[in-house]
Amino acid sequence: MKKFNQKLALVTLSLALIMPGLSSVLIPTPVSAVVKTKKQTKVTVKSKTPIYNFAGRKISPKGYHWPKKTKIAVNGAFYLWNEDRNKAELYYHLTDRCQKMIKAGKSKKVNLGDAFVKTSDVKISRKLKAQNSALTAENNHKIAASESDLITLNELIKNSAQIKKSKRYQQASAEERYNYREAINDAKKALKHDTLSAARVQYLIWQANIAIKAF
């Protein structure tokens, strides 16, 4: 029942932007899921702090490094399973895909895509509770996504056209709109694969909803 209620809340989060008042019917109050997060959590990175993708592999752009004592916004903590190292480690998810970095002494905005930093590599302003456990990350990496999770992800994609017409989306910042569009694009690309792990699909659902929650 708890899992069902969580999935219902995730789908309703996107529907709430399309149909005002729907959340009060489907989700018991308080409806925290559709309230914009006011206070950002930030981490302080070192010059050479590596950047990782969902698979726990380094994706740091060649020739770039972080400006000294840079603080970047993060919006979630996840244990990610690294197949190469055969272990799960804890990471923070970067809120924005585009980040200011330094190359040849000049500051440039770089599109990192969907990216993470290891919790052990950074200092954080306030700790974030992990969305999963190391054991869950490992187990869910090895099993196929459930039909109900796939339905939830498809619903989020289906609702995206209407969300983009909503007032909240249109009044959001350019970065917030971009983060949301790319989260939906990630979901669309992933669904083209024959099989998807439970870990991947559950993460994509979270990613789409946290992007909505930002505006």
Image (tube, helix red, strand yellow):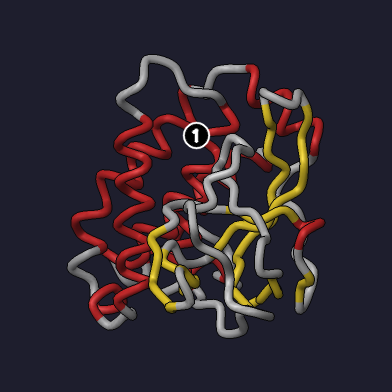
For the point 50% across and 62% down, which residue is it?
A: 64
In the visual, does 126 lie left or right of 107?
right
Q: Residue at x 44, y 16 (%)?
A: 195
In the image, taking residue 40 as reference, residue 214 lies left or right, namely left
Asked whether, in this view, residue 110 is left or right of residue 41, the answer is left
Please name whichever residue, 136 or 33, is drawn nearer the observer in this view of the structure.
136
Residue 1, horizontal then vertical, whole percent: 66, 38
Residue 134, picture quadrant: top right
Q: Residue at x 58, y 77 (%)?
A: 67
Disc 1 crowd rating (10 Å Cα; few below 14, some 14-19, many 20+) is many
Q: Give the answer, above or below, for where 35 lies relative to 149.
A: below
| Residue 176 percent coordinates (x, y) | 37, 71
Residue 65 placement: quadrant = bottom right
Residue 140 sits above or below residue 38 on the image: above
Can residue 24 be spotted in the picture?
A: no
Q: Position of residue 40 (x, y in %)?
A: 61, 79
Looking at the rendered structure, the kind of residue marked 1 is Val
Q: Residue at x 60, y 38 (%)?
A: 57
Numbered-mark total: 1
The x and y percentages for residue 96 are 46, 67
Residue 94 in view (yes/no): yes
Quadrant location, the C terminus: bottom left
Between 44 and 20, the one lying in front of the other is: 44
Callout 1: SS: helix
Q: Is residue 69 above or below residue 122?
A: below
Q: Which residue is mark 1?
A: 201
